[in-house]
Amino acid sequence: MRILVLGGAGYIGSHTVYELIARGDEVIVVDNLETGHREAVHKDAIFYEGDIRDRAFVDFVFEKQKVDAVIHFAANSLVGESMENPLKYYDNNVCGTKVLLESMVAHGIDKIVFSSTAATYGEPERIPILETDKTEPTNTYGETKLSMEKMFKWTGRAHGLRFVSLRYFNACGADETGCIGEAHAPETHLIPLILQVPNGKRDYISIFGDTYPTKDGTCVRDYIHVTDLAAAHILAVKYLVDGGESNIFNLGNGVGFTVKEVIETARKVTGHEIPAKVEGIRAGDPAVLVASSEKARTVLGWNPVHNELEEIIASAWNWHKNHKDGYQ
Ligand code: UFG
């Protein structure tokens, strides 16, 4: 198949491109390189630098390239930034997707797999979280992703387009080749921040609060390997090609780890003592976020294989220790 990957130079996008190419698909990558990295684009992918808000550019790509389906990662994704600059998120995430959908409809492209988030749920009403649970985002990032899901739904009804929305929990780890990995600036995610300590770039890791109602007082998250996320996108494309109806799936391991457990596992993996300091809570952090991914397993046949936290952190460490400054 020929798959257009929007945001294919970013963290999860680049891993999905590697998986697609390994499985023999032809891949066209579009990325504006605002947060993505040219070095992360697989050498066998066709690459266009450009922005999905630019209708002429998106039309140009669809006219140049025959495309069977689109996988859409092109978005801003920092929760804190989304609260300080909400309109940046509406502009890129919501308005960008509107332009993309207009162009897809005009060119008769009717299948899209979309990168969504656990942040669409907000404070969960129960654990594990099901796709049918209420969606009340507590930040602009999650709100824009939910708006994008709804835009797909209504556009689909009007124009016959079908979509799969994949709501990720905590993406982490790196490709086993060691060629690509997580590289955000600024970095806000727990595992890469922890690994900055053994890399000599940080003296200690901050623990954001230890009085949550969890087993050791620190927040619980569902950490899922990026290569398993990539595999889910490919299964979702197959599901749509096989005639599946529009659908939404959670993607997580279904197992929660506390911040302290993640730090302890990183100590074991790296052999470094990794000093930690308890600090104040980060506003908006739910105590526990754990997915039920039963639906993805049953309907898509998804079976995450890198489900040991130690293995996940070891793969992240393999990337970070050799790329202390990311792709620079
Ligand atoms: N944390 C720390 N110290 C740090 C960084 C994080 O204690 O230096 C804690 C956070 O408070 C949180 C946990 O580690 O409890 C995980 O934090 P991350 O920032 O790695 O991930 P989040 O769970 O906040 O965010 C993830 C995704 C977001 C998504 C969100 C949904 O990365 O894209 O889940 O709630 F929006």
Image: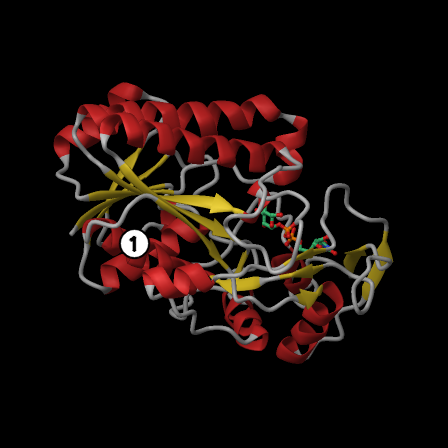
* Closer to us: 199 or 78: 78
Query: Percent x, y for residue 173?
Result: 51, 64
Under circle 1, the secondary element is: loop
Identify the image quadrant of residue 51: top left
* Dot 1 crowding, Cα within 10 Å, few <14, some 14–19, many 20+: many
Residue with the mark numbered 1 = 42
Q: Nearer the viewer, residue 297 or 282?
A: 297
* Vertical relation: 194 (above or below) 241: below
Left or right side of 210 for 267 = left
Asked if the beta carbon under badge 1 is closer than 8 A to the nearest atom of ligand 1, the reply is no
Query: Residue drawn 48% across and 30% down?
Result: 147
User: Toward the viewer: 319 or 254?
Assistant: 254
Residue 157 x, y percent position in the rendering: 30, 30
Image position of 302 (left or right of 316): left
Residue 325 quadrant: bottom right
- The mark total stands at 1
Q: Position of residue 121 (x, y in %)?
A: 59, 44
Q: Residue at x 38, y 69 (%)?
A: 177
Is any atom of residue 179 visible in this view? no
Q: Can residue 44 be spotted in the picture?
A: yes
Q: Amino acid at mark 1?
A: His
Q: Is residue 178 left or right of residue 277?
A: left
**Which residue is at 55% across, 74% downward?**
314
Question: Which residue is found at the position 61% from the left and 31% from the top?
Answer: 140
